[in-house]
Amino acid sequence: MDFTRSLLSWYRRNARAFPWRTASIDPYVVLVSEIMLQQTQAQRVAEALPRFLQQFPTVVDLARASNAQMIRQWRGMGYNSRALRLRDAAQLIVERHDGVVPQDVDALRALPGIGPYASASIAAFAFNKRVVVLDVNVRRVYSRWIRQQRTTIDVERDDILTQFAQRVIPARASARWHHAVMDLGATICTARKPICTSCPMADLCPSANVLEQAQRVKREEPQFRGEPQRLWRGRFVDALRDAPDGLTSNRLLSVTGAGALTSDEQAWYVAMIRALERDGVVMRVGRRIRLAD
């Protein structure tokens, strides 16, 4: 099919180089990288992944990690709860699969923290399974190929995208195909300003050179002092990463720039620390707060 050949030919010449894309695929490396990539830009993951793998070179090593070890190694990788679920998944892989990452999508889906996207992406990239992988880049690219879209933010429903994907994914090149679509979406068929004049699929794409630019309305996030609460959560955890013995509440507020709190702010802070405790990220030891064991 010209459609398939055009994209894979382009990918051979333009593939981005990442440590999880190697000639010899390690399913464990794919597992870790896919969880990291859920919330973090690929280049940052490319920098962090080698350090993480040096600390936890195998599934068995990862399964033995404490909460605090995981959280320290997860710096800059998004929600720390994902790190703990990754460790939990490693434990089940050791217990139920003899330390071997399973190939079956349903078996992967049964692991903690592995949802529909992660299970499909691991099956495709680690084992070349012909499954449908839909991330934000793939959704955008497929939508523009399926029919002429009006604006840069228009996308088709997932059921339509899935039916289309099932027709076009090559039988024996699922991993390369999905890497190619993702790279095309990240570098050429971008969200805001697609570069249709450089696209290898332009002659076959009904949306080429006709899209009107548009921008999605961002969903409001819970705020604290004019900043998203998730940023404050991250600051608290980052401060505790650098304090093995923990910090008192006053010291934690001081080093993160929060300072003195009003009564309403104090209630917010208490709720934030309790949420971190429930997530297994921090624990209280006497008057101090530190990363959980």
Image (tube, rainbow, N blue to C red):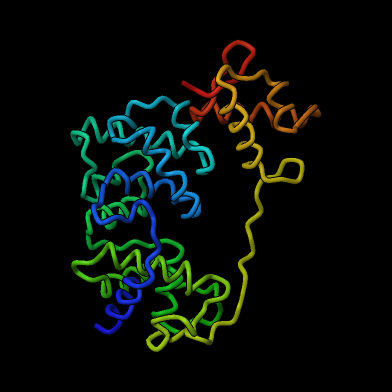
Q: Quadrant of residue 15?
A: bottom left
**145 above or below 233?**
below
Give the percent coordinates (x, y) of residue 277. Answer: 54, 26
Please state if 196 lies on the left or on the right of 9 as rendered. Answer: right
Please state if 164 lies on the left or on the right of 262 as rendered. Answer: left
Q: How many marks?
A: 0
Of residues 13 and 75, the one drawn nearer to the viewer in this rendering: 13
Question: Outermost residue toward the top?
Answer: 286
Q: Quadrant of residue 97?
A: top left
Give the percent coordinates (x, y) of residue 32. Answer: 36, 44
Please state if 230 lies on the left or on the right of 140 as rendered. Answer: right
**268 above or below 181?**
above
Give the percent coordinates (x, y) of residue 143. Answer: 43, 75
Give the percent coordinates (x, y) of residue 279. Answer: 50, 31
Of residues 45 and 204, the one drawn nearer to the viewer in this rendering: 45
Q: What quarter of the picture does the N terminus occupy?
A: bottom left
Q: Quadrant of residue 21?
A: bottom left
Of residues 92 and 3, the one drawn nearer to the viewer in this rendering: 3
Residue at 35% in and 68% down: 180
Residue at 71% in and 28% down: 255
Question: Outermost residue toward the bottom?
Answer: 203
Residue at 25% in and 56% down: 23
**9 above or below 206?**
above
Of residues 217 and 59, the one drawn nearer to the viewer in this rendering: 59
**93 above or below 193?**
above
